[in-house]
Amino acid sequence: VESQRPEDQDRAEDLLDAILPKSGGAHRIGISGAPGVGKSTFIESFGLHLLTEGKSVAVLAVDPSSGVSGGSILGDKARMHRLAQRPGAFIRPSPSAQTLGGVARRTREAMLLCEAAGYDVVVIETVGVGQSEARVAGMVDFFLVLLHPGGGDELQGVKRGILEFADVIAVNKADGDTLAQARITQAEYSSALRHLARGAGVWVPRVVLTSARSGEGIAELWALIVEHRSQALASGAHAERRRAQNRHWLWSLLEDSLLETFRAHPSVRDRMEEVERLVEAGQLAPGRGARDLLGRFGGAGRLRE
Ligand SMILES: Nc1nc2c(ncn2[C@@H]2O[C@H](COP(=O)(O)OP(=O)(O)OP(=O)(O)O)[C@@H](O)[C@H]2O)c(=O)[nH]1
Ligand SMILES: [Mg+2]
């Protein structure tokens, strides 16, 4: 399914069609956070805890940078070695792909395969930068954001995006020298969350403390995730979230492949560089340039200006 070879794609689609009725049953959990916040360490502790609860767990990663940097997640498999050795756990490094859309697509398909294979929980890890966070939030039932113990300026920078996606925020490294700082960060984010207006019966995101290293707070966090799920199942929010995600997914696939087809179109390709040059130099209005290229693409190109 991860193959980029055209001759594999038909078989991959047949396979995905075949397993579709068996997919959808897992608890899908997204985990995001800045580099070095402790995602890999956390997932190992969390995964081991799930195994003690009798759950099987698959770990996937969306890391659009790994193709370039040489695959930090591959190293992660070694870092999560205790989890990787356990029979109830499966860890899949990030597929290499050129675009975030490509990585996200293959990860989503791998998630469906893991569900069909019977994994109870699928964890999808992503680095909390840019669009990958939104992509992962758009394919899971529960989105967890890990934060560094440290407030102030950092709070301002990340707050917006986080409050938009997170179902729970965990301030990690709440241990040793950084415990006091972690408590301050927890208080800051809790108060930021209180200012958001929410409807009745809607899940209110919480801010918790964890130590991925010692395992402190992990069991409590899992209990919170379970509570979130039963609330969402009862209110219908779970079904609605999945419906909306399927719809968005359809559109994001359309957008990705339309753009790809557009860029590959011979007469668009011939003209692209020239249009870019003229637009850069301010000699052609971007709107006119776009219309020119779209016109070559299919003649259907009309842009509202
Ligand atoms: N004190 C303390 N250190 C931690 C904790 N969790 C992770 N670390 C340390 O923080 C460093 C980074 O941890 P990783 O798990 O590799 O972090 P990551 O978020 O996966 O990093 P990237 O994959 O590079 O984005 C390592 O040295 C860990 O040992 C924790 O709860 N407490
Ligand atoms: Mg990592």
Image (cartoon, helix red, strand yellow):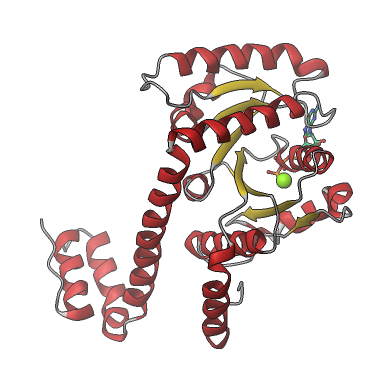
Tell which quarter ligand 1 is in: top right
Asked which quadrant contains residue 248, the reply is bottom left
| Residue drawn where x is 55% and y is 24% of the image | 154
Q: Is residue 172 left or right of residue 264?
A: right
Question: In the rendered view, does 175 fall on the left or right side of 65?
Answer: right
Q: Position of residue 14 (x, y in %)?
A: 53, 80
Q: Image quarter for residue 177?
A: top right
**Residue 123: % across, % down:** 66, 48
Which quadrant of the rendered structure holds the N terminus? bottom right
Q: Can residue 129 be seen in this snapshot? A: yes
Indicate left or right for 112 with 50 as reference.
Answer: left
**Vertical placement of 218 versus 55: above or below?**
above
Task: Give the camera-side residue of 229 and 142.
Answer: 229
**Res 146 seen here:** no
Quadrant assignment for the C terminus? bottom left
In percent of the image, x 55 and y 88: which residue is there?
A: 7
**Number of disc labels:** 0
Q: Residue furthest bottom?
A: 7
Farthest residue to the front: give it. Answer: 234
Q: Which residue is at 16% across, 68% downward?
A: 291
- Is 130 above or below relative to 19? above
Q: Nearer the viewer, residue 225 or 234?
A: 234
Relative to 189, say whether 103 is above or below.
below
Return the x and y of residue 222 as percentages of the image width and height.
Answer: 69, 32
Q: Residue at x 54, y 47 (%)?
A: 140
